[in-house]
Amino acid sequence: MSDVQTLQEKINYDKTFDCVQCGYCLPACPTYETMERETHSPRGRINLVKLVAEGKASIKDLQEPIEKCLGCMACTTVCPTNVQYGQILEGAKEVIEDHQVKSVWQKKTEDFLFESFFPSGKWMNTLGNLTWFYQRTGLQAFANLLSLTKLAPLHLDQFEQVIPVQPSPKERAKRAKRYMRKRPATAKVAFFTGCVMDSVFFETNQNTIELLLRSGLEVVLPEQQTCCGALHAHSGKINDSRELAKRNIEAFEEEKADYIVNNAGGCGARLIEYHHLFEEGTSWHERAKQFVSKVKDISEVLVEVDELEFTTPIDYTVTYQPSCHMTNVQGVKSPPLELIRKIPGITLKELDRPDFCCGSAGIYNIINYEESMDILDVKMKDVCRIDPGSIVTTNPGCLLQMKLGIEREKVSDGMEAVHLVDLLMEASPVARQDGPRQTPFQKGSE
Ligand code: SF4
Ligand code: SF4
């Protein structure tokens, strides 16, 4: 195969012809709205991909517009010809990655992050424990007092402010791998814990296990599971993403569970697309399809099983910020809203533009901080119009981003961001089987 053919295949040239240039996607695209450039719209990006495949534009021309795409997939929900933008985007990222010249330092850092750090449960635990140490020993207060955090690169000082209080290493270590029920379980759930989710939002994961148990389900946490590979795919590292998919498929197959449940919109979107990583007709493609058929967001399972009782009224207004990957890729829209509406006393007010991305998009807000904050400011205008007590969301990235938005708007006295699972726990406060329960509403516990 010639170099041109290889490039055209990788970049999904044939799929670009599905775009009829109608422009219906333009109003749905957050980057087109905030950057006001055709090259930063879905149509413009698809055109650029086509031009690169035809040798009429360089890969360098493509790089910036593709890097500034959130991957929110809002464009795909309004496209009348069903353009497979996700595959075009992923192909473009892979080609850009293949042609990028990197310094030895950059390469080593990336190799460590993508090959060792994110896929390792041990590293993720260590990150959580180090954060706990930093928060609990006074180091954080000291660093903030001397404004040392401002020296951190990539605006990490902003994120440091919104990381939740971490549980102690002892508490992390207490977690079991299997949660059996005294009464026979109605179904078996294999819980996909996620990398960032399990590190930074460990308590939300614990609450997830608890809600599943209360719903009459048996819960297992397959030991060999690893990162879903979304961060790798977003960075054009498709081969790495494929390898992680294989490891997860193997780890979850062993358990023969009825459901593979996750609580992170971004991870779930990657998990349900595992079959696209393998050639049709191969055994891995078949195994991936089996895996995908069991993947569900926690909200879907809780609605389906319908066993939870919400006894504690929540007397404030909340709004729901959907995760783009959960709605636009997984197609999970109504279950979170159905669950929120079941909570007594709660007032749910919907955003004018819930489908407008919050600007988090994996690590977009770290790499493209300024652009991400422009998008977040649009979102926060919509939120502040409602002035809720809580912004409820279903993805770790969105959760941190909404916390950042609250800080930027200086409304943290009366508003917080919370994962749906933690809100449900607050409305259903029964002691957990594996120890004391913590929610974001019970801050400061060890
Ligand atoms: S809506 Fe679809 S077909 Fe129309 S310009 Fe956008 S991507 Fe192309
Ligand atoms: S994925 Fe989102 S940011 Fe990217 S082109 Fe589509 S709508 Fe725009």
Image (cartoon, rainbow, N blue to C red):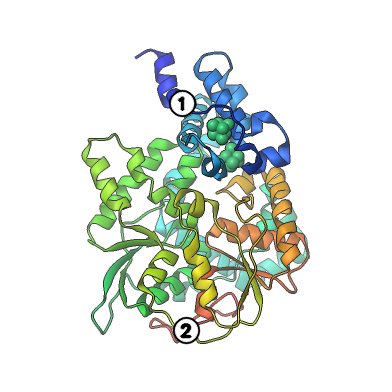
Instruction: Look at the numbered disc 2 and give the secondary structure of its residue.
Output: loop
Q: At 49% from the left edge and 83% from the top edge, which residue is drawn? A: 310
* Horizontal and vertical percent position of residue 185: 26, 77
CA neighbours of label 1 inside 10 A, class few (<14), some (14 to 19), many (20+):
many
How far is mark 1 from mark 2, CA to CA?
Answer: 50 Å
Q: Position of residue 324 (x, y in %)?
A: 54, 51
Left or right of 438? Residue 383 is right
| Number of numbered discs on residues | 2
Residue at point 63% right, 48% down? Answer: 365
Is residue 114 shown left or right of residue 72? left
Q: Taking the image as drawn, is residue 174 in sight? A: no
Q: Which residue appears at 45% of the width and 37% of the height?
A: 237
The residue carrying mark 1 has its beta carbon less than 8 Å from ligand 2:
no
- 229 relative to 419 in the view: left or right: left
* Residue 11, label in figure: 1
Whole-percent x, y for residue 147 in the image: 77, 60
Residue 109 locus on image (x, y percent): 52, 41
Q: Earlier in the sequence, mark 1 or mark 2?
A: 1
Q: Quadrant of the C terminus?
A: bottom right
What is the secondary structure assignment of the residue under circle 1?
A: loop
Determine if residue 53 is in view. Answer: yes
Residue 87 in which image quadrant: top left
Q: Amino acid at mark 2?
A: Pro
Q: Quadrant of residue 146?
A: bottom right
Please name whichever residue, 204 or 265, is drawn nearer the observer in this view of the structure: 265
Q: Residue at x 56, y 69 (%)?
A: 132
Compared to residue 16, the image places residue 105 above or below, namely below
| Residue picked out by circle 2 | 436
